[in-house]
Amino acid sequence: PFTGEDDALEISVTSKKNRKNSEKEAKRSAREEENAMQSAQIDAILESIEDLLETTNCDVSQLVSYIKNLVDVGNSSINQVLTPNLKSLVSARPSSKKRATKSFSGEDEEDSWKQPSFRLAWVGSDNAICHIGTSLHKVPLARLQEIYLLLGYNRWELLEVIRILGPFPNVRNTLRGDIKLEKKRTNDNREGVRLTIAYNSMVDGTGKEILAGKEDNFKYVKLDIWFASEKAIVCTVPAEDDEGDEYEVNANPFANGNGASILLFVAEENLDEQLEKLRAA
């Protein structure tokens, strides 16, 4: 039988456990509320960006301001989420469990899995396009139609769709490479990630794959990532000093209103369909 002291001790322990559980539940609810508010803000900003891009004469300074707001909202979370979000996108792949099971509809789960896909919605300069791509859109009679990005499997896959003036089909070039991530932070405590792509494969417009072979032939491309989610990615071309050496991520990349170094990717839900429309599937 319990004594009076035993009863009091048990009540005290139970009370402490209940209090701790209540505190955990309160923190969890606060995080969920913060995440919901942040998601709503991100959706609103992306909608404003989309509307602005559809205007005839896009106000670039306003657009850069919206993109900066998007980055600021992503950095407003108590827990910095850029790095884990980006790692999740980069390493995405069907789980082994999904490969072995079928969905309720009977469809293979692996078939229902979608690789993270994005479209280059806006870029501040042609130099920024050339920084990540092949630059083949600069040849005579060539016009860049679209650029798409596929992530997952710790790889970066860039699809360039180029239109050739005249009675010629569109050309699709595909660049593939491995990715390395390095967390950075600016002087004003802004979270950033230095992403290094090691391009080691290119599929040209004829469908022929050209492999880099040994590592000395890899093309290394660096980008600074400031916002990453399944909805959008904001990155900039790293600044260079007069000697061509890259600065550390230590300055405000959005201080220049023309956004020359900015690349904005937005989620593309129907990549295969879009490639079909462009006759570049």
Image (tube, rainbow, N blue to C red):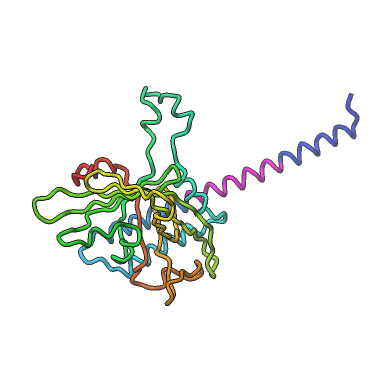
Q: Position of residue 225 (x, y in %)?
A: 45, 58
Horizontal arrangement in the rendering, residue 105 relative to residue 139 (left or right): right
Quadrant of the image occupied by residue 223: bottom left
Q: State the residue lying farthest toward the left.
A: 167
Q: Position of residue 138 (x, y in %)?
A: 22, 62
Image quadrant holding the C terminus, namely: top left
Please, is residue 158 above or below residue 242 in the view?
above
Q: Residue at x 79, y 38 (%)?
A: 13
Q: Please, what is the dominant secondary structure of the magenta stretch? A: helix
Horizontal arrangement in the rendering, residue 233 relative to residue 160 (left or right): right
Q: State the residue lying farthest toward the bottom.
A: 242
Q: Which residues are magenta?
A: 19-37
Q: Residue at x 62, y 43 (%)?
A: 25
Image quadrant holding the N terminus, namely: top right
Q: Residue at x 8, y 51 (%)?
A: 167
Q: Position of residue 77 (x, y in %)?
A: 53, 56
Please name whichever residue, 244 or 149, is drawn nearer the observer in this view of the structure.
Answer: 244
Quadrant of the image occupied by residue 59: bottom left
